[in-house]
Amino acid sequence: MEAFVNRIVKYIDEHALSNQNVCIVVPSERMIAYLQRAFFEFYQKPILSPKIVTIDRWIQDLNPTPVLDKTSLLFELYELFRKDPVELNVDSFDSFMAWGQILLSDFDEIDRYLVPADQLFKNLRDIREIENWSFNSEELSKGQIQFMAFWDKLKPYYFALEARLKAKSLTTKGKAYGYFANNIDLAFASDKDAQFVFAGFNALSESEISIMKQLSIMGRAAILMDSDQFYFNDPIHEAGQFQRDLCKRLEQKALPFIENYLGTKEMEIRVVECPQFTSQAQVVGSELKKLNTQQLNETLVLLADESLLSSILKHLPAEIEQANITVGLPLRQTSLRSWVDLIFRLQESFLRRGNSSIYYRDFIQFAHHPFILGVLSSQEKNEIQNIESRIINHNWHFLDRKKLDLSERLSELNKLIFEPWKNDWLRGIEVIQLLNEKLDLWLDEKNELERAIVRRFAHATVVLQNIMSKDAPTMSIASFRSLFNGNWSNETIAYFGNPLEGLQIMGLLETRGLDFKRIFVFGLNEGSMPPQNAINTIIPMDLRKYFGLPTPREKQGLFAHHFYRLLHHAEELLITYSSASESVGSSEPSRYIQQIELELAQINPNIHIQKSFYTAGNKEKVETTTIQKTEEIVQRIYEVLRGGISFSMLDKFMSCPLDFYYRYVLRFGEENKVEEDIESNTLGTIIHYVLENLFAPFIDRVDEAGRKISGKVVTEEDLLRMEKDVPLLVSKSFEIHFSEDKNSWQTGTNHINFEVAKEMVQNVLKRDRTILKENPQKALFILGLERRLETSIAIEDTSNSGKSFEVRLSGVCDRIDQFDGVHRIIDYKSGSVNQDKVELKKTANQESYEEAILTNKRKGNPNQKHVLQLLIYCYLYYKETGILTDQAGIFSFRSIKESPHFLKLPEDIRKEDIPDFLEGILKQTIADMLDKNVAFTHNKDSKYCAYCN
């Protein structure tokens, strides 16, 4: 079987067409290189190559009028819209842009398909009138009148745009095609003896068919198809739809070359279902590794989903010496996308807030962007880390740009990227260009990819700058952003390689006219191929069908032919698709897989299809992480214990030893971050702060002269006065937390938290006031607030000849008071607590209360959590003051009316027993920490922390 390009060369030779006069018109740039190689291989000597050109370039080069770019064309149409808007007083570019681009696309198709515009717009208007039941204009509402006015103005817009461009000696691409079709002599402008060969075309517009038909009738053109009887002779097969129509239009039964490959050839087809999108790359990579150099030269990796390009590049085997990637890396899939998003997000923020302060997240994204990291020195990176630390420590939400000018280079970049454009879009483009220049200059050699991205982006930006500098309309930042992104997002970075040797990696449209023995189709899911992109048009589909404009069916036929044509010469076909579901239908195999199996394989017994499911091959048993206690780890635990322990540390060890190991032995603390929405622990801290400040005047204190001033009794009147002070104190605490940025908590979720904090504090005061009111003869004294208590415990070291060592135990009591002579310790909790959670009890299978606390905690049962905490507070207070606390309880902000919930001990444990009882629990827990025979493991009944998960 001869490749299509070889048959083209052979056809030209057999028909004695002069290379000097023949012009070969092809559908793609890639096909040109393959044709040139085919000429060399046919003649086996250097020859003068015939002219080979794509049809788009051929028509534009021969047209006497310059073709206007899409953005400039949009501006021209907008000027017409401004003079005669669809609605009165609605003439902004923003309202126009939404449908202006669609309208231009329809205008282009009308011209390219030689549709009589008068008839189409009249029919379109009639259809909308019928849909709107607007035969009697007197009965129309205002909205209906405006609706019909839009359709009335489409025809005037079309002809006014045509006249406007003609006056400026400009044209559109569609009109260039139509003009060529009506002035076929343009084809002979440079060569009166010119002959033409149209090769490898599929879907053709009416103007293209007219051009080919006229030249064919004149005997000056040959039309060569690459088709197969399997789908060409089947009147309902979409892959042959366009070629059947072309033959009919040319009044010929067939055109060269229609072969019978698919019905007779031998082909091995393997279809591999993969559980993830990226696992397909592993399948293709492992298959490529099996091929030698000669086989790779005959192999195509076809990207059904071009977004998977980066995935296949990562899995290319190292043995592949040459790989040519014709798809190119789209700029929208690079770090440039986040860079442009950052630039526009900053500008939107400046406009919204009316100042140039910088949101901290935007600064962090800027500082960590690959472009900036490639520019910064080590010292500059360290200085930025220091700024980030200050942002977190001070909870800054917005920053002043001057604080970020850490070096001369950073100052220059900051001045540009953080400059408000103030709706001056030309200045915006100028700033972006200056940024491009700085980045291109300062990016070092190891950041060559980033530099290539910046240069390609700069080129696209210059094009838009030239267009906008002429006569750009006034527009919003949203419209400018859309226009700007449309200008660069379709640009690609070319991967340099040999287009004729080695492995070829292509998208479907790049394969037109090319043939390969071995094809690996990567990502053949429904929706990827054929794509599900809808046609954006204002012309109804039935009207499009009537006037010969393309519909979704024609689009499906286009891709079907491209795919089936690739199978003509393929001897081996590997297809992968993913069963992972990211959207509706995305997990389905492409219809082409079903068609090959149910249609093609049924008529050709030489086609063998093998289906399989890919598994990653990792059969290792996943085990829970276990950390054995080495001598080094034990010594580290000693350091932790000597540094002091607290209830939270003991609770962490009892709940999950592995979490304790990560948090305290390895010192993996929680991530520090800026709080935009107040978290529950922060809200609790704020409430503690307010209560401490409210009750502070009532405790014993020392004046400036060193004299002790006794505290005073708390009365109902005092509590009433405190309630009035709550809003001011809560505001002050929020200001401290948000670095005096009132905008951060005066609206939204944080304002709700502000109101909640006020209500919780006032409820605590109301509860205290209710208790005093119910007990008028009893006095309340505040003995301590946020009081830190410490003591040392001698622990026997069983691993070191029974020697003992000191462990410091500490805790902070929220409130210590005396009510009617009874000493009380109260701990405030923002969570829900009931009386059952502060009662020490054991189950039937537990021999002691010590075992109840230890065993329950190790199972992750939180029932005894508050019991242990209150026991520790009682123990610490006794060690420091010698006073055995009468009551210790939890004051829950969520159950104010029942609070405080006081610790309840069983009858056989008195308050005098608490010191010995607690010391026994502490010593046993510490002994477990140091026991080398007991590893740190995750408690399966507790929640997974960030490290275990």
Image (cartoon, rainbow, N blue to C red):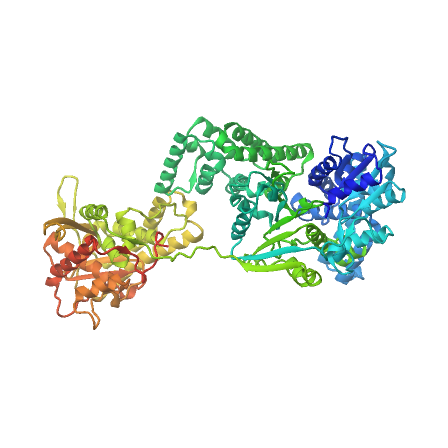
Residue 548 visible in the displayed image:
no
Image label count: 0
Q: Is residue 541 above or below residue 220?
A: below
Query: In this view of the protein, which residue sits in the foreground, 287 or 946?
Result: 287
Query: For this view, does 635 lie left or right of residue 357?
Result: left
- Place of residue 535 in the rendered image (x, y in percent of width and height, measured from the top left): 69, 53
Residue lying at 12% horizontally and 56% vertically, measured from the top left:
878
- Establish if 263 lies above or below 741: below
- 770 and 894: which one is in front? 894
Horizontal placement of 277 versus 818: left or right? right
Left or right: 749 with respect to 721?
A: right
Quick check: can you spot residue 22? yes
The quarter in which the C terminus is drawn is bottom left
Q: Where is residue 386 in the image (x, y as percent from the top left)?
A: 36, 35
Q: Which residue lies furthest to the right in this view?
A: 218
Q: Pick whichever, 815 or 654, lies toward us.
A: 654
Where does residue 362 sit, x and y in percent of width and height?
A: 47, 41
- Establish if 907 lies above or below 717: below
